[in-house]
Image (cartoon, helix red, strand yellow):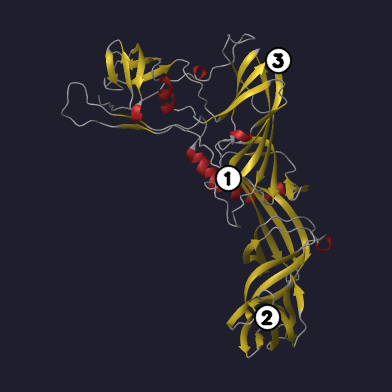
């Protein structure tokens, strides 16, 4: 039999009949588990770990490869005997194997991640072979006809059911139809983790549910404004926190962790939002006409609005930037976490579903910097004339108005010209420990040009300065393994195990460095 319809399908569902509440008695029936729904979290903590393979680019809510440790404090009332405890509203990307329930005085027998959410197709699948009530509205009288029946099949999205009037396909009567479901399933409107607990006595308990979940990430974004003489800058930074899950965490203690955490890879079973229900049949009384089509899209959890989610995705970060003044005094606090760095948000914050938000990381004024130009060359090579790289150098210590671990991210440097703040350069910044040297890439220098030429056994590097001011310059050499500089006409130092020439290039002049290396 082919199944059809020509009008929208309406599913009448009583939610109280979908999620079965805990029994009113203190004990469940022998051999059965009492259904217990844990209360909503009274306290939340979300610790976000950065994606290890993400560079300094923007965060994409549709491709978040970080993860989070979520801790929830919940209250539940256990019955004597077996209890099927449901924790509704966990993150979509929960890793069920990582879930731990602490504070529970009873024994946990098993735990399950319930991936199928309440949807039209999920209800149909759960109701196959079970009793339903078919509701038909008679157009002439406007009255609703109620027929007891059984759903026989939901294969390939089609619905076949049987009533006292026979077997037919959904909507083949041509009348408006809907189903009323009995308590046939424990489907939830939100992602759920369930555990089976053996309790010796009825009692209320307050427990903590902790688990790892995918679909999170965070990033640091720095903004620096150079002084008019280019010798100092004001540095500010934001922590951008992103949650790609369909579940939010209101008024949570939020932390982010900098550093690389080794984790075994593994796929997380996706939440099942339901597949479309398609109905097709030959209208009654005719087998010559082509069948009509109806498709009902997959359902989403109640309260989830795709348009709202997309809007939040696009405007959350800009809005946070506009409201920077509100976060001026809410600075992230840094702590040590073994070899990792923990940045704790000072106040509770809502980590909303499908949203990114920003919290102020730091504000530092008048950070002294040294402008210089750098060339990084392989020794013993000919290199065509090319511009040097401009840098701003400082040290991450209290003497330079810093002195805290700085997580990697993007840094945008602005200059004041004619009273306007103009972007001069944007680059990536690596993780930086306290007392480490910080070098901010400022792009190529149009005035400082570098040429390398090998003449016999001696290497010549010429550095020319077309600018109107003297320039501090560093020539950094990459040597082959075992090689060393044995002779040079300028003092040679060492940095990170590599030879380096520190020079001053006068305005409108050129300086040539000659050196000879020895290879083993």
Q: Is residue 183 left or right of residue 65?
A: left
Foreground of the two, 166 or 507: 166
In whole angstroms, how far apart are the C-alphas of marks 1 and 3? 39 Å
Residue that badge 1 annotates: 265
Residue that extends furthest to the front in the rendered view of this protein? 520
First along the sequence among labels 3 and 2: 3
Foreground of the two, 445 or 19: 19
In whole angstroms, how far apart are the C-alphas of marks 3 and 2? 78 Å
Residue that badge 3 annotates: 203
First along the sequence among labels 2 and 1: 1
First along the sequence among labels 1 and 3: 3
- Quick one: label 3, few (<14), some, or many (20+) residues within 10 Å? few
Tell me residue 275's x, y (percent).
Answer: 41, 33
Q: Secondary structure at mark 1?
A: loop
On the image, which quarter does residue 198 sit in? top right
Q: Is residue 369 left or right of residue 212?
A: right
For residue 12, above or below residue 244: above
Look at the numbered discs 1 and 3 and tell me whether their residues touch, using CB distance below 8 Å: no
Tell me residue 57's x, y (percent).
Answer: 58, 57
Q: Quadrant of the N terminus?
A: top left
Q: Secondary structure at mark 2?
A: loop
Q: Is residue 316 visible?
A: yes
Foreground of the two, 403 or 6: 403
Tell me residue 75's x, y (percent).
Answer: 68, 23
Foreground of the two, 514 or 62: 514
Residue that extends furthest to the right in the rendered view of this protein? 399
In whole angstroms, how far apart are the C-alphas of marks 2 and 1? 43 Å
Tell me residue 415's x, y (percent).
Answer: 67, 68
Residue that badge 2 annotates: 519
Q: Residue at x 66, y 64 (%)?
A: 413
For residue 514, above or below residue 484: below
Q: Nearer the viewer, mark 3 or mark 2?
A: 2
């Amino acid at each position: 039999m082919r199944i059809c319809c020509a009008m929208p399908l309406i599913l009448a569902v009583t939610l109280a009949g979908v999620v079965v509440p805990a029994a009113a008695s203190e004990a469940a029936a022998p051999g059965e588990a009492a259904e217990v729904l844990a209360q909503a979290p009274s306290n939340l903590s979300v610790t976000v770990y950065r994606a290890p393979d993400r560079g300094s680019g923007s965060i994409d809510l549709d491709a978040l490869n970080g993860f989070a440790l979520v801790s929830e404090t919940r209250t539940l009332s256990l019955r004597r005997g077996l209890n099927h405890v449901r924790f509704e509203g966990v993150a979509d990307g929960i890793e069920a194997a990582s879930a731990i329930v602490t504070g529970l005085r009873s024994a946990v027998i098993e735990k399950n991640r319930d991936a199928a959410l309440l949807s039209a197709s999920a209800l149909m699948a759960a109701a196959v072979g079970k009793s339903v009530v078919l509701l038909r509205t008679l157009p002439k009288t406007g009255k609703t006809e109620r027929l007891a029946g059984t759903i026989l099949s939901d294969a390939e999205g089609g619905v076949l059911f049987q009533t006292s009037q026979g077997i037919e396909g959904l909507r083949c009567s041509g009348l408006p139809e809907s189903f009323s479901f009995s308590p046939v399933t424990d489907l939830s409107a939100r992602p759920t983790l369930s555990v089976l607990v053996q309790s010796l006595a009825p009692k209320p308990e307050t427990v903590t549910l902790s688990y790892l979940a995918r679909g999170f990430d965070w990033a640091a974004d720095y903004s620096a404004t150079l002084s008019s003489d280019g010798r100092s800058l004001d540095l500010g930074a934001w922590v951008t926190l992103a949650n790609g899950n369909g579940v939010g965490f209101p008024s949570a203690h939020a932390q982010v962790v900098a550093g690389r955490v080794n984790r075994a890879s593994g796929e997380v079973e996706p939440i099942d939002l339901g597949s479309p229900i398609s109905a097709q049949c030959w209208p009654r009384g005719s087998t010559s006409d082509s069948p009509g089509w109806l498709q009902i899209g997959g359902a989403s959890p109640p309260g989830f609005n795709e348009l709202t989610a997309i809007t939040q995705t696009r405007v959350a970060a800009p809005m946070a930037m506009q409201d920077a003044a509100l976060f001026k005094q809410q600075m992230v606090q840094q702590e040590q976490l073994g070899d990792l760095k923990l940045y704790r948000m000072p106040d509770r914050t809502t980590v909303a579903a499908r949203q990114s938000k920003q919290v102020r990381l730091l504000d530092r004024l008048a950070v002294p910097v040294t402008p210089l130009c750098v060339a990084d060359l392989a020794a013993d090579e000919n290199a065509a004339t090319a511009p040097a790289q401009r840098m701003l150098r400082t040290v991450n210590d209290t003497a330079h108005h810093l002195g805290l671990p700085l997580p990697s991210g993007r840094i945008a440097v602005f200059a004041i010209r004619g009273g306007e703040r103009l972007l001069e350069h944007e680059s990536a910044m690596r993780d930086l420990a306290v007392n480490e040297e910080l070098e901010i890439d400022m792009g190529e220098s149009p005035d400082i040009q570098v040429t390398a030429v090998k003449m016999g056994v001696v290497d010549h590097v010429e550095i020319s300065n077309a600018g109107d001011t003297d320039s501090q310059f560093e020539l950094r050499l990459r040597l082959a393994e075992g090689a060393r500089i044995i002779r040079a006409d300028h003092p040679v130092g060492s940095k990170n195990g590599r030879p380096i020439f520190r020079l001053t290039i006068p305005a409108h002049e050129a300086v040539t460095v000659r050196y000879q290396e020895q290879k083993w």
